[in-house]
Image: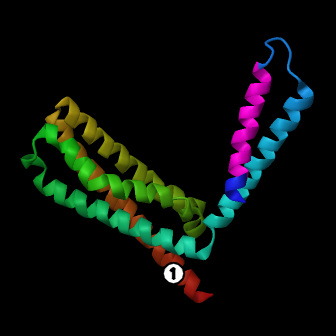
Amino acid sequence: MKHAAFMLVILAFLGGAFLASLDENDVNWWLFIPTMIVGFVSAFVYIRESNRDAIHSDTLTNNQQIMSAALHNIVTHLDELEGRKDRIPTYDMRFEIDRLFREDLMQFADARNSMKHLFGIQGFADIMSSFAAGERYINRIWSASTDGYVDEVLLYVSRANDQFKHARDIFDAAQERHSRTASAT
């Protein structure tokens, strides 16, 4: 159902664009409006089905484990990088960033919407605030490495480490509260 709705969204909006481009002065509203309605209804169905999948307990449990593992891996790698950052040539740091963090950052980002269902909107916001700041610092390290700014590379490794440790601590506390709540019911 979800994939069919997604395909209808694509087809409806492509069809609407086609209908709007047939004549530069006039749009056939009798065809255009129903086509757009199909697109909007299909988008609504797609979002509803996606949310239904996202709150399935197996999905939530799996995503919680993925996020926890990814966050702990990021902190472990940052601790390791912090200890050897002055021995890595500045221009090579971007390759270390890609090697150490790319997969974990993508896995966490792919699973992050489950946090809303697990920890609530406030828990999601608290964790993502620190996570996003840490991710921006990692991106800054990558850019500074490319540009050859040694001092920035060294500085932002420490800042990223602090932000991700904070995100991990908030995540672990939210996870603990969630498990206590789940075991109490």
* Residue that extends furthest to the top in the rendered view of this protein: 25
Corner quadrant of residue 107: bottom left
Q: Is residue 66 left or right of residue 86?
A: right
Q: Range of the magenta residues?
A: 5-21
Magenta highlight on residue 15:
yes
* Residue that extends furthest to the right in the rendered view of this protein: 30
Q: Is residue 117 left or right of residue 164?
A: right
Q: Is residue 31 left or right of residue 14?
A: right
Corner quadrant of residue 38: top right
In this view, the residue in front, 105 or 154, is 105
User: Label 1 sits on what residue type?
Assistant: Ser
Task: Give the dominant element type of the magenta stretch: helix, strand or loop.
Answer: helix
At x 55%, y 59%, the residue is 113
Give coordinates of residue 20: x percent, y percent: 78, 23
Give coordinates of residue 74: x percent, y percent: 30, 60
Identify the residue under disc 1.
179
At x 64%, y 66%, the residue is 53
Figure quadrant of the C terminus: bottom right
Callout 1: helix, strand or loop?
helix
Decide: is 151 above or below 68.
Answer: above
Decide: is 83 above or below 35.
Answer: below
Q: Local crowd at mark 1 within 10 Å, few (<14), some, or many (≥20)? A: few
